[in-house]
Amino acid sequence: MQLSQELLFVFIISYVFAFCDTSPHNQPGKGQSVVTIERLTKHYGRVVALDNLTLQIDQGEIVGLLGPNGSGKTTALRLLLGFLRPTAGRAVVAGFDCWRQSVEVRRRVSYLPGELRLYENLTGRQFLEFLARLRGWAASGAKEPGNGIPDAPGLARQWGLDLDRPIRTLSSGMKHKLALISVVVAGTPIAILDEPTNTLDPAMREEFLALLRQWRNCGRTIILSSHVLSEVAAVCDRVAILKQGRLAALERLSDLRELRRVRARLARPVAVPGSVPGVEAEENGQRTYSWVVRGSLQPLLRWLAEQEVEDLHLEPVGLEQIYRRIHGDTP
Amino acid sequence: MTVWALARKVAYDWRWLLVLTALVLAIYELIWGKITDRIYRQFMPLVNELLALAQLTPWAIKALEKRFLEGPGQIIHTLLGGDLVNLNDPATVLTIGYVHPFVQFVLCLWGVGRGAAALAGEIDRGTMELLLAQPISRRQIVYAHLLAEAWTLPILAGAMVLGTALGVWGFALPNVVLSGYVIAASNALALALAVGGITMVFSAMGQSLWKVAGGVLLLLLVMFLVNLFGQLWPVLQPYRPATLFFYYQPQLHILQNAWWLSLPDFSYRLCPPLVLSVIGLVGYLLAAEIFHRRDIPAPL
């Protein structure tokens, strides 16, 4: 009885490790920095596409890059993949310089381009097999890069994609699914996704976001750029908001969830006490007051209870508000 | 393995165009067998008979020939091999099939198409992004295309020789030594490789298939004209060795049945297939270095 319990324990442990196995890629331990970006700058002639971006991303983190078109998101991703030579600064992924050792970087990174162009003359199966051969495997699905990584045919069946159809006959949504499959089956410890849910239907979008959370639980690191704030808020651990090539804000989503905005209109102007515990920022208008509070609301509400309050609004400070503060209403 | 996988895909992508181009070249050489047969067995006996009836002296025949080849006639005469061709000898008439501008155009089109599509074309289509997201270096991409050329170009050269051999056999042409045509076909192969190498250099710098292809075709047209008119006008003659087409000498290869040639008007001996192959390989190496260092623009 004792022995069988031990066997069961070993079985469970090995299953968990097998599912999350990323050992072939020699990645650092969870919590360690896998992506280090130091003062990364890219100029296109006189245009500054990215300006002094500094960012560290830990293993097992999902980091979202937000910003309107032309804010430098895609340039940052392309610099990480070694498509562009930095004008200044450097980026290091898994210990490898993104420009000088880009092949080693790309061995550890799978990428979903924002502007998706596939080999239209191939079938889905031929396409996946070709990419698998480039990664040095015999064929996609037949030889998996690590245990627990879904096989391509299984995933295609699950997502309703016929791998034997020529890519040119697939709809844009189906092409996107095929590209996502290529990213999933690559099984790399890091994934860079440029607007990954573009053209996906709502159900598929939810399924994909769930997959991203599953990846994170297995220790994979994901960098994604998106225009959909709700999506970023749903899956990301941190979000970097770019404005005109500069890092305008770097927020931890868990911290944002603790922030609330309190707005009140009082019957007459009052002198607000200098320090109400938890209040991080305040704005005063004519008889209207607004506070951003971290943690407990008690001290502020206690103070407000002593005032003649005409109107009171309480709302969480979401990503959208932060984004609006930086970019206005630009999508 | 990565280079091999990409080279296989390139060959797969080009398979139908390869078959089509090989068929065009083989059929063209076969047709030249038929043309040679007509000239040798029907046209020249008639001309010779007429000349005999007219009782012209050899001097008068030469003067007539000179008059006939003045102006545009001289250009056509030069294009088809000049004094190397004797219409009474089928072995020399058949060589026109290798030097004819049509064949040179097809070989150049192959080299330009392959080179322009390899890098600029992939960037143009947006698939370079996908390719470079895999663990493959930019140099490896260029070398994979070179490896693919190592399979495809011998097929084109083989098709030319096969077409000629079928023509010689089918029309029972006398005095033809086929080994000379094998050397000439290798010269054709080397021309396509050199054109491909030069195109790759431009392709490594560009991002539009049509701009690269158009630019290289224009450059090749200038080279072709300099080489052609360099044979007619002494002022252009020193520039001929700066053109690729100066090193395309299939007729001399066939008639001399040799790899190393003594060229008329030039004092040195050279091996044209070797020169063109070196140009092609240097082009590929240069393209690899340029492509390795450049930024890859986002797809438009």
Image (tube, grey):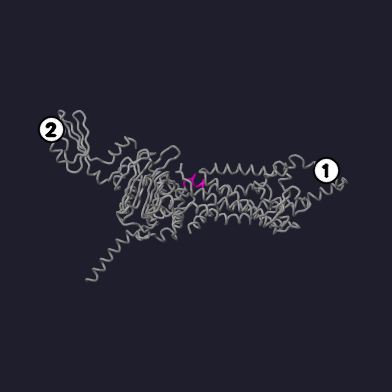
Residue linked to disc 2: A307
Taking the spot 35% from the left edge, 58% from the top edge, the residue there is A22
**Discs 1 and 2 lie in a common subunit:** no
| On screen, residue B44 above or below B235 | below
Name the quadrant of the C terminus of chain A. top left
- The answer to which image quadrant residue B213 occupies is top right
Q: Which region of the structure is painted magenta?
A: B119-126
Question: Which residue carries the number 1 mark?
Answer: B63
Q: What kind of element bears circle 2?
A: loop
Q: Main secondary structure of the magenta part?
A: helix
Choose between B195 and A279: the one closer to the eye.
Answer: A279
| Residue B93 position within the rendered picture, expressed as x and y whole percent measured from the top left | 74, 51
User: Which amino acid type corresponds to the residue marked 1 in the rendered image?
Assistant: Ala
Query: Could you tell me which chain the residue with mark 2 belongs to?
Result: A
Q: Is residue A234 magenta?
A: no
Amino acid type for the residue under numbered disc 2: Gln
Number of numbered discs? 2
Residue A230, position as x, y percentages in the image: 30, 43
Whether residue A328 is visible? yes
* Chain letter of disc 1 in the image: B
Q: Residue extending furthest left?
A: A306
